[in-house]
Image: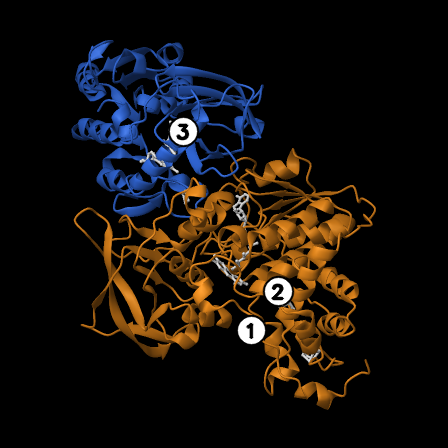
Chain colours: A blue, B orange
Amino acid sequence: MFKIVQAEWLAPKVRRLMVEAPRVARRHQPGHFVIVRVHEEGERIPLTIADSDAGHGTITLIVQVVGATTERLCGLEAGEGISNVAGPLGRPTDIEYVGHAVLVGGGVGTAVIYPQAAALREVGNRVTAVIGGRSREYVILEAELAQCCDDVFPCTDDGSYGYHGFVTGWLKDLIDDTGDVGLVLTAGPVPMMRAVAEVTRPHGIRTIASLNPIMVDGTGMCGGCRVTVDGQMKFACVDGPEFDAHTVDFAGLTDRLTTYRNQEQLAWNRLHETALGDHSRGAHCQMSGLEAAAPV
Amino acid sequence: MPALKPSERMKIPRQRMPEREADERRTAFIEVNRGYTSQAAVTESMRCLQCKDAKCIAGCPVGIDIPAFVDAIARDDLPAAADILFADNVLPGITGRVCPQETQCEEVCVRAKKGDPVGIGYLERYVADWAREHRRELFDPPPPSGRRVAIVGSGPGGLTCAGELSKRGHAVTVFEALHRPGGVLVYGIPEFRLPNAIVDAEVETLRRRGVEIVTDVIIGQTYTIRELMRTEGFDAVFIANGAGLPIFQGIPGENLKGVYSANEFLTRVNLMGAYRGEESDTPVLTSTRTVVCGGGNTAMDAVRTSRRLGADPATLVYRRSRREMPARAEEVKHAEEEGVVFEVLCNPVEILADENGWVRATRCIRMELGEPDASGRRRPVPIPGSEFDIPCQIFIQAIGTRANPLLTQTTPGLNTNKWGNIIVDENNMTSIPGVFAGGDIVRGGATVILAMGDGKRAAAAIDAYLRNGE
Ligand SMILES: Cc1cc2nc3c(=O)[nH]c(=O)nc-3n(C[C@H](O)[C@H](O)[C@H](O)COP(=O)(O)OP(=O)(O)OC[C@H]3O[C@@H](n4cnc5c(N)ncnc54)[C@H](O)[C@@H]3O)c2cc1C
Ligand SMILES: Cc1cc2nc3c(=O)[nH]c(=O)nc-3n(C[C@H](O)[C@H](O)[C@H](O)COP(=O)(O)OP(=O)(O)OC[C@H]3O[C@@H](n4cnc5c(N)ncnc54)[C@H](O)[C@@H]3O)c2cc1C
Ligand code: SF4
Ligand code: SF4
Ligand code: FES
């Protein structure tokens, strides 16, 4: 059992969990993820490590409710436990000096860029974060990012907070205005990452996307997480999950993510028949999954 | 009972393994083989000629004293049979079920020269099953050596090494990446061949002997090998992290929805319990028509599993002829009885999609056997213009695996060959002193018993290394 020491809602359907996992915490680097199994009959799902504290032996996960497993996980309170947490997995982010690094996060993708921001700043970069949400309440980690970025620009689809529009709109202007962007890192819904890649492509700015294909083991054994990058088959859990966004086949990734849509809907229905209680805080699941949760 | 004369022994026919009917098992995940009755076991054991120079022993990679344990069955002394078996094999309930006996112990049994060999595997299973039900081993723990050994991976190689080292008094910790110990035994080989409960029971026996098993730890990521030796206080390491990455053919359509590697398909079904349908949170696609590509045990398991999940037809496509199939003979026979369709001398060239990106058919080409290749088998060559389509909604690739790089790439100084497999000496020691390796990561995809043989040999070498600093 991996004990949850702290749990809070960051936004509707987005929960921050601090979990005791000392072995993972001591090795965590930005870009790493864990595979979590909530209960003994549960499925294995990948989640990014948003933060860690090696001294206290804890890691932080930021989880968005998109289906049965994430809903179960988000229903847990401090003091309760998670059956399995394995990691850290994946290759860490390449952290190097580029001058000006821009991080573009959408929805829970912001959890991926948060540790990257701190590490990029540490090696002397100017770091700008552009973070998006559907409306004000969906913009997460702004205060935390402000601690380790030179600038943080929130964007909302409905204009209820920050820039009125998609993160890509802001990014375009930022690139034109500053002219010194050396690297863009992006994490979030697939359509958003794809759009970010199209914004930076004409400028030739190195752009790295953190991909989120369906995973099972997370150790290279199953091949379920395969993605096409530069025409080659890659396993995201061992070769990634970060890849050059200009060479990723985003259409293929989007399509494969829909493989289990029917089964996921059934699992969701089953979970709700067997009444979970009020853990979801009345939050209503949308089966369109991550795409629906953040702006493009 | 008076001892039988050899001529009398020679007259006894090989006892058949009782099986569930093919009709019953086509949809069920219960074990196909039911195991010998005690009468059948005793009769079978009397077929053994108790050879002085028993060739069968050398045919067994862990060197079980086969005539001795078979004789104990004949005398109906099962405690003695179990003692003999466990002395050389810490996982007999597993090997008795999945060893390719026909190419190991039974191949060299003298009785195979004229007729059927002694049913060594079946007898081994019989004794192991008896021991599991009737015996709680009381261990006389050996005096602790004060030395600690880390084992990477809890497949048959790792578990065997752990068992052998604990017998010698060393403190053993097994690190396993997944949430459940057993390796391929639990995620790959299906319930109907090797129930996971049997693996759990054999793992439990090791735990009772003091072997510590820590799951959810990925060596190379959670700890490096160097850390295990330098800061975590281990005096030696045995690496048995298995084969790993599934190979795809590189044909068009392999990323379509409905294409699996056998590892993914079997892991979803076996390890994650998707065969239990709604009781499991992990989904798996099922279909009316499935094509599986390959001819080994993995392909056979995938196609028989598909069949049980409703595929009709479940078709196996293999590029050589039936004779060259590397799968155990029993699996091929069982697959056939269960109605699996065999398309041999045939190879997929493309997986075709419907308008929504789902698999709709496999395009294959007929093959013929040409000149022998490096493996000595005649090389299959495509027959131009012989393409044809097999309609299907699921395509499963089962053509093998390549070495998993997670551990090797974070272990400087660990020598690997051009395929990424770890290079070891005759004692299974790697290029790093005190670090040993065995099983599929050394051999490429091999067998349970060869991995166990490596585990056993490495345990002896680790013991010597720890005692003499060799
Ligand atoms: C490397 C990586 C890091 C991730 N980090 C985070 C994170 O920090 N926070 C977060 O909220 N989400 C993260 N995700 C996505 C998260 O894994 C999925 O949202 C989760 O698995 C959905 O499970 P579910 O049962 O709740 O939903 P389901 O109803 O099963 O599925 C909803 C959608 O989630 C995706 N999905 C389903 N199963 C998996 C799976 N086993 N692996 C990956 N995606 C799946 C599919 O697109 C699916 O349509 C990450 C994914 C990857 C690959
Ligand atoms: C479907 C299938 C059917 C088979 N059927 C048969 C059969 O009938 N008879 C037969 O003899 N052989 C069979 N085989 C082959 C046999 O299973 C393997 O040769 C054998 O399991 C190899 O044992 P191993 O100990 O080397 O590794 P594995 O059994 O592969 O175990 C390796 C373990 O290490 C873990 N691991 C991997 N990387 C790490 C890491 N970095 N840190 C920690 N842990 C790690 C893995 O999760 C796994 O649990 C079959 C194989 C498959 C896939
Ligand atoms: S372990 Fe395998 S090879 Fe050895 S005796 Fe048993 S069945 Fe034969
Ligand atoms: S070779 Fe065959 S007959 Fe001889 S001892 Fe071994 S099992 Fe018995
Ligand atoms: S998740 Fe299985 S290989 Fe990547």
Residue at disc 3, secondary structure:
helix
Q: Which residue is drawn at 37% across and 75% down?
A: B321
- Give the residue pinned by disc 3: A70
- Within 8 Å: ligand 3 and the Cβ of disc 2? yes
Query: Which chain does tag 1 point to?
Result: B
Q: Residue B318: where, in percent of width, then height? A: 35, 68
Instruction: Report which residue position mark 1 lands on.
Output: B103
Spatial CA span between label 3 and label 2: 41 Å
Who comes first in sequence, dot 1 or dot 2? 2
Q: Where is residue B418 in the image (x, y as percent from the top left)?
A: 45, 56
Can residue B315 be seen here? The reply is: yes
**Lateral position of residue B54 relative to residue B141, left or right:** left
**Which sits in the foreground, B172 or B71?**
B71
* Residue A5: image location, x then y, percent: 54, 19
Say left or right for B403 vs B165.
Answer: left
> Where's ligand 3: which quadrant?
bottom right
- Within 10 Å of disc 3 (Cα), the crowding (few <14, some 14-19, many 20+) is some
Is ligand 1 less than 8 Å from the beta carbon at label 3? yes
* Residue matched to label 2: B96
Is the residue marked by circle 1 packed among few (<14), some (14-19), or many (20+) residues within 10 Å?
Answer: few
Front in this rendered view, residue B298 or A23:
B298
Amino acid carrying label 3: it is: Thr
Q: Is mark 2 on a helix, strand or loop?
A: helix
Residue A213 visible: no
**x and y percentages locating residue A122 in the rendered image:** 42, 17
Q: Which chain carries label 2?
A: B
Find residue B295 and name its label.
Answer: none
Amino acid type at circle 1 is Thr
